[in-house]
C-alpha cells in the first residue's frame, strides 16, 4: 500500500476540484486534509490524538504554517470515518507493519471508495489492532 497515493486518491475521489478554477492543483479543502494528515504522520501523532482533532464536520488543522486553527471538513460522516481509517492504517503500517500482515490491501485502497460496509468493518478491525 502506498500511503501518499491512497490519500490523494481518497481526496480526489470525494472532493471534486478543477485545477483551472484557482490555478492550484488542490482546493483549500483538499489541501487542509492533505496537510493535516501529512503533518500528523510526520510528527508521529498517535491515531487517538489525530481522531480527537476531528469534531463532527470540522478538524483542527495541523501544519508547519498553521499552529492551531479549525477548518470545516466537506465530507460526510462515513467519508470522515474513511479518512480516520486511512490514518490508522498508515500509522500502524509505519510503526507496527507486522500487525497488518494478514490484510491484503491494494496499492491505493480503491476498494474502500464508496464502500460503506467495508469502511465500517475495517475501521473496527483496525482500531482493535491499534489498541493491542
Image (cartoon, grey):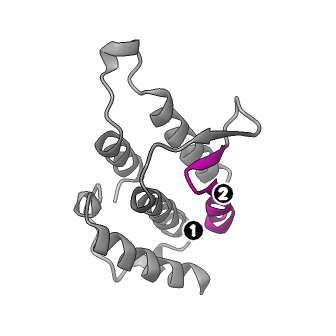
**Is the residue 21 above or below the residue 108 in the image?**
above
Total tally of numbered discs in the picture: 2
Residue 58 inside the magenta-drawn segment: yes
Residue 18 lies in magenta, yes or no?
Answer: no
19 left or right of 41 in image:
left
- Please provide the residue range marked out in magenta: 44-61
If you read the primary sequence from the N terminus, does the residue marked by circle 1 or circle 2 appear first? Answer: 2
Residue at 45% over, 59% down: 77
Q: Which mark is residue 44?
A: 2
SS assignment at label 1? helix
Q: Are marks 1 and 2 in contact (CB under 8 Å)?
A: yes
Of residues 112 and 108, the one nearer the viewer is 112
x and y percentages locating residue 60 in the rendered image:
67, 46
- Above or below 100: residue 29: above
Q: Which residue is mark 1?
A: 95
Categorize mark 1 by other alpha carbons within 10 Å: few (<14), some (14-19), many (20+).
few
Residue 41: give x, y in percent of width and height.
Answer: 59, 52
Amino acid at each position: 500500500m502506498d500511503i501518499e497515493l491512497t490519500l490523494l486518491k481518497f481526496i480526489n475521489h470525494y472532493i471534486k476540484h478543477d485545477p483551472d478554477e484557482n490555478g492550484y492543483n488542490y482546493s483549500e479543502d483538499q489541501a487542509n486534509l492533505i496537510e493535516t494528515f501529512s503533518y500528523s504522520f510526520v510528527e508521529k501523532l498517535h491515531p487517538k490524538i489525530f481522531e480527537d482533532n476531528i469534531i463532527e464536520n470540522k478538524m483542527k488543522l495541523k501544519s508547519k504554517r498553521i499552529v492551531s486553527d479549525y477548518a470545516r471538513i466537506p465530507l460526510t460522516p462515513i467519508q470522515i470515518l474513511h479518512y480516520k481509517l486511512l490514518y490508522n492504517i498508515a500509522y500502524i503500517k509505519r510503526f507496527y507493519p507486522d500487525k497488518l500482515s494478514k490484510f491484503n490491501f491494494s496499492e491505493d485502497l480503491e476498494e474502500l471508495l464508496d464502500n460503506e460496509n467495508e469502511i465500517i468493518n475495517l475501521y473496527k478491525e483496525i482500531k482493535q489492532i491499534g489498541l493491542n
